[in-house]
Image (tube, helix red, strand yellow):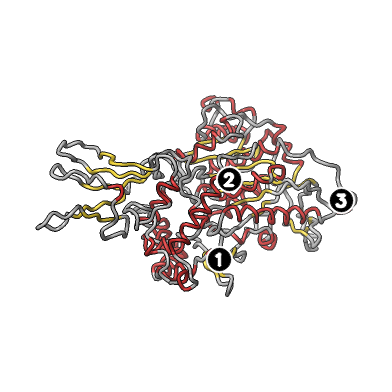
Amino acid sequence: MATLKGVRRVKLQFDEKGNPAYESVTSPECFKIPAGVKLLPHDVIPVIFVPGVMGSNLRSTEDKKPVWRPPNGKWEGIKAAWQGSKQKPAKRQRLYDPAKTEVDDSGPCSIPETNFWLTEEEAKHRGWGTVHQGSYHAFLACLEETLNERRTESGHLMNDLLLTQSLGEKIQDVYRYSPKPEIIAKVAAADTMAKWQTPSPPPPLTEEDIKRLGSYYFPVWVHGYNWLRDNAEAAGKLQETIDKAVNFYRGSTYFNCVGKVILVTHSMGGLVARCFAQQHPDQVIGVVHGALPVVGAAATYWRFRAGMESGGAFDIEGNLGAIVIGESANEITPPLACAPGPLELAPTKDYPKGWLQCASEPPFMGQGESKAKVLFSLPKEDPYTEIYSKTTDDCWWAMVDPARIDPAGTIRDNGGKPIKEYKDAIDTARVFHDKLGLYAHPETYGFYGIDNRSYRSFGHVEWRGTFGSAENPPEDLITRKGYANYKYGRVEIAEKEQPPYKPVVRVLTLAPDRNQAGDGTVPQASGEVLRRLQNIAGQDRVFGIEGFSHQGAYDNVFARRAAIYFLIRIVRNAPPPSPPRKGAEQCSK
């Protein structure tokens, strides 16, 4: 590594008491390259990563076999898609039962030899095996290295990220082709700043900020959780992960650990972290949110009525993922209708009103207008009473069809009623949303998607039908029940019969058009609410960033740099370094 030139780096390990340890072998005298290690700071601040929905591996509580383990790469994706296409709705319901699943910590966990801060064994110990490797491990490794394997010359961090006072310089003032590392880094920083969309330029870090990192060791831990269950439960179990990390270092004779952590989240993991911080704010130094659906996402409704969206004609991995999760309401409803976690991603009462719409395709009423006319929109106030409490037994546009909830018959076999199970899950989601409200930890930072080209999202969901000049839309359209087909975002309703004629059938379909900038899942209107949460002092703590998909948020280099920038700012508020513990000097020899 650049910080230890001319040496053979040895990987960091830990003994049974949590003390840092290094293993090397005796080499012949003719081998002149010495083994090199990097001595750790005594003060430790665990960084806890909380993944998004479907980002944690799940297994059965009965036979311990994997239930949900997302594929890594296209070939695994093809295999998983083939297996998923063979799963009938009844099997999906039995597999993804919230009461019969638990976190699976045996997922793949391969650490490159070039990462000197982590072994596979240590990564497993910290929970890396509980989350999808393809989505998160590269980012987690980036955090581990960047925060601990740093250089402070000219404020230079790994990955060509310079974030010092030089950020105030304009990019055209920097000589792009200078061979000097600090000039190259300065260009990278200016490019990064140009990608971070904020109302005002974010304050640059100082040389002191970078050097302060050297006072702490930042081990990256992971909190995998059962995303089928209530996020409040996942927040409660986050305490267990934090206690495990803190007690591990407190049990050593080398480290000082005051018990405070930094939380980094993705997507729904942000809801888990906000819930935990609301209850235990003093245990959290700060929080970094990535792609957080602050007030939900209208795509949740779309998926219940039309299945998982594909990634487009040329997005092979996105299309394979849609097959694995479910391509239709018939496949999505059984595993998710009674799962509180996914339902807690639905738009809350703080989401922009009127996000569920019914419109007449042009031309309508014989006027020949070129734009669809909105016939009704919901909710006016509360999505729970106006939308989620309804089913297709009540009206054609409701989110869930009760006939699709229990294809395996397991609810009825246990004496329950499918529609009650769904409404109980919805009520759990409502309670979670009401308690969480618009809370954010005082030291909250984050980024959200604002892509208006490749990754547009559903800001609202729109049903469309054709109502010509001869026949007006029925006055009771909003209260009509469905007539026939509910599959693939399509529904049929019947007009009143006029003898001797048969009833006229109106076909309405969910418009596939993503209608708002975002990240493909979370619309900008939901993500940017993070700026307005009550405890955020200053708008420079939240960035809008283009060019990333929701699931791949942390694959984006500018999103990664934003997370690192936020972490360094959070460290400003960390407890001051403490004197080495008694006996720690001996551990350093």
In depth, the one of 584 and 36 nearer the eye is 584
Task: Tell me how far mark 1 sits from mark 3, CA to CA.
Answer: 45 Å
Q: Residue 385 at x, y = what percent?
A: 43, 47
213 left or right of 370 in image? right
In depth, the one of 339 and 27 nearer the eye is 339
Q: How many marks?
A: 3
Q: Which of the two labelled residues, at mark 3 and mark 2, occupies the earlier sequence position?
A: 2
**Which residue was labeled with disc 1?**
99
Task: Tell me how far mark 3 sits from mark 2, CA to CA.
Answer: 44 Å
The local secondary structure at tag 2 comes to helix
In depth, the one of 565 and 33 nearer the eye is 565
Residue type highlighted by circle 1: Ala
Tell me which corner region of the image, top left, top right, bottom left or bottom right, holds residue 472. Answer: top left
**Which residue was labeled with disc 3?**
584
Q: Nearer the viewer, mark 3 or mark 2?
A: 2
Q: Which of the two labelled residues, at mark 1 and mark 3, occupies the earlier sequence position?
A: 1
Task: Tell me how far mark 1 sits from mark 2, CA to CA.
Answer: 23 Å
How many neighbours does mark 1 have within 10 angstroms: few (below 14), some (14-19), or many (20 or more)?
A: few
501 left or right of 329 in image? left
Residue type highlighted by circle 2: Lys
**Which residue was labeled with disc 2?**
435
The local secondary structure at tag 1 comes to helix
